[in-house]
Image: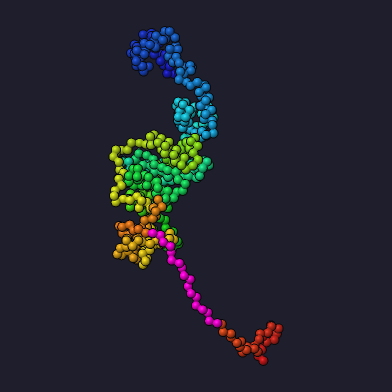
Amino acid sequence: MTQKERDRLVALKKAKKKLITQKEAAAEIGVSERQVRRMLRSLKERGDKAVIHAARGRRSNRKFATEVEGEAVEILSQAVYRGFGPTLAAEYLAKKHKLQVSRETARAWMIQGKLWRAKARRIEKVHTWRPRRSRWGELVQWDTSEHDWLEGRGPKLYLISMIDDATSRMFARFVEHDSREANMRLLQSYLEQNGRPVSFYTDKAALFISTPKVRRGELAGKDRPALPPTQIGRALKELDIEWIAAHSPQAKGRVERGFGTAQDRLVKGLRVAQAATLEQANAYLENEFLAWWNQTLTVRPALPDNAHRPLGKEHSLAASLSHVETRQVANDYTIRFESKLYQIQRADIRAGLRGGTVRVEQRLDGTLAVRFRNRYLTVAECSPRPKTAPVKPARSPKTVRRKSDWMKNFHVGKNDGRRKTSLR
């Protein structure tokens, strides 16, 4: 009997002996007068056990059968569920095996079956808290995670992720290379689906910022001349999207924590789905993981309006999301790009084109576009002119020189005590 139950028993016996009223006993115990009357009747029938719950020591009516517990532990002992935590294990038991159990029940079963060991919680380093942005599309965090996503079943993959700061909504794709082209393709899909956000928040990777190489003695800091933007930086500027650089991984903690969740749940989900290719991994990512994330982990923004802006007529994704370089037009209206020669068609020749500068766009679909001022030109690849070998001048015949005998009587002797040089 606990101390609380002993106190209740004392109050009930005082009420039974009319030392206090039932109302006073109810106030002392912390129950209603009606409950006090029930307890007094039970005290008369059961004695001092009236203050002890009748179900104490009995099996709970909601307790699962031993067979169900054994079946769940046997399922979670399979290699495919290796490393699953109680929360994820409970979800997969319900979804794939029709065993509806709570997270804490699964935790108790896994601890008893030695499939899970509780970890002591550590006090992590506290960073300055930054409030979320107020509208969806006001700030989008963008980063890439390199991880063994397929656990050796397929090629090495990278996960490029974009997470909205206000809502935690995720947009992600698997790629085989963390390249400019792969990031631009994901950016194109995001813009086509949602529109233009106000700003992107990324790290200082070479994809987003040009890093100068400074030698000793060269100009540094503000005195250094500004470098041209990267291809992605130029594209964001053309689309009127602000780029913000994070100075530490903790600054873009929302996308970093998202990678932590993905490296746990997503890896195990891909293992259960037996994904072994890029296509299978992206199918599971889009249909299962992102659907679960955007339904479960997103929050409601402070303001309901959407900060994304639509793409206007002045915006061309195909042109902006290209590899762009400039070339000078030769006197015969040709340009060179990627070791190839291109001829500008006669119908597109304009004043100022010869000797002028054109913009060459290598687009994501593999096509090439050439623009002069605000007009695109039609070009065709042509074979370069054959190189003619330079004519070497004929060599004049060598003249035979007659040896001079002016040093005939001049010689150097050995160091044997005699004079080194003698003239005869």
Q: Residue furthest right?
A: 416
**Whole-percent x, y for residue 296 in the image:** 39, 34
Nearer to the camera, 398 or 227: 398
Query: Where is 318 relative to 273, above or below?
Result: below
> Is 222 located above or below residue 49 in the figure?
below
Image location of residue 395, percent across then percent down: 53, 79
- Chain part drawn in magenta: 380-397
Q: Main secondary structure of the magenta part?
A: loop
Residue lying furthest bottom: 424
User: Which residue is at 54% across, 30% downward?
Assistant: 77
Q: How is the image coloured?
A: rainbow
User: Residue 369: horizontal and vertical position, in percent?
Assistant: 36, 56
Q: Residue at x 42, y 56 (%)?
A: 211
Taking the spot 50% from the left edge, 44% from the top edge, the residue there is 155
Residue that appears at 53% across and 81% down:
396
**Is residue 251 at all visible to an observer of this figure?**
no
Numbered label tally: 0
- Location of the C terminus by quadrant is bottom right
Residue 95 visible, this orientation: yes
Please provide percent x and percent y for residue 259.
44, 41
Residue 381 lies in the magenta-colored region: yes
Quarter occupied by residue 47 = top left
In the image, 377 versus 304, the foreground residue is 377
